Amino acid sequence: MDKERLDREVIAMRVAKELPDGACVNLGIGIPTLVSSYVPEGMTVLYHSESGVLNCGPLADEGEEDIDLINAGGQFLKMVPGMSFFSSADAFAMIRGGHIDVTVLGALQVSEVGDLANWMLPERGVGNIGGAMDLAMGAGRVIVAMEHTDRNDRPKIVKECSYPPTARGCVSLMVTDIAVIEVTVEGLVLKEVAPGWTAEDVQGLTEARLVLSPDLKEIEL
């Protein structure tokens, strides 16, 4: 479909609007790592990393990189007042103990009931579960930030995941390059569409059936 899609930074901006003030948030690899740069001014978000950091800043500017200060994706972070450092074991204890309010993860597939697959590409035979399984089940809310389709334009929002699952029924919201979709007991609710896109356009690139929100609107930042 020859319509303009949102770029990765805009997806991250939209996700940032979902983060509550004062929340403890873990950001996955890929688009999610960009979210820390777009939290609205005046809000406080405590970022957590499996590498053993709490209250880490946004991504470091060029020339300010510190090899000892990275996120789970190996990207350099800014130093901010109040940062704390601890072992990876303690970082995972926080996740498993239910102390992470929100996690933002990338995905290879999400099913119509919120199952998540994001660690293994069977066709490549490679994958790394990392902290994804712990985060998917331990965080209070799971938001997926991703492109709506894969490189071959195949739907990533499917009826049932064909890739190895990370966790079942864990996803609550998806923000893609063409839509915002909420996972509910009634099904997948299409809440917002990218500028220039219609609900029919989005459904055409989605295998799972979408329920239209009565308040369907364009994505606003």
Image (tube, helix red, strand yellow):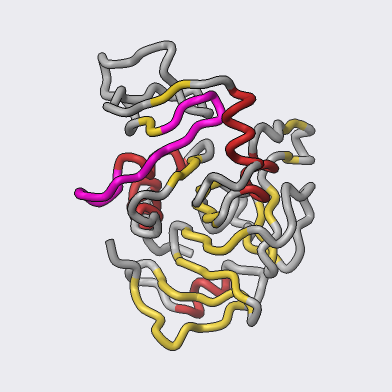
Which residue is at the front of the view, 203 or 80?
80
User: How many numbered discs, if any?
Assistant: 0
Residue at far top of view: 67
- The magenta span reads 38-54
The furthest residue to the left? 41
Quarter of the view holding residue 194: bottom left
* Quadrant including the C terminus: bottom left
Q: Position of residue 109 (x, y in %)?
A: 66, 54
Residue at x 54% of width, y 54% of height: 144
Q: Is residue 137 above or below residue 130?
A: below
Q: Position of residue 84 (x, y in %)?
A: 41, 25
- The residue at the point 35 percent across, 46 percent down is 9
What residue is at 57 percent from the left and 82 percent from the top?
211
Residue 189 is situated, as x and y percent measured from the top left of the image, at: 54, 77
Q: Residue at x 66, y 45 (%)?
A: 118
Most frequent secondary structure within the magenta stretch: loop
In the image, 121 versus 117, the foreground residue is 117
Q: Nearer the viewer, residue 121 or 154?
A: 121
Q: In the displayed structure, does residue 110 sit left or right of residue 178?
A: right
In magenta segment, residue 191:
no
Instruction: List x then y, in percent, for residue 79.
Output: 30, 23
Q: Viewed as shown, does residue 215 lie left or right of 94? A: left
Q: Is residue 157 visible?
A: yes
The reply to whether the magenta stretch includes residue 42 is yes
Rendered position, 7 above or below 182 = above
Can residue 5 be seen?
Answer: no
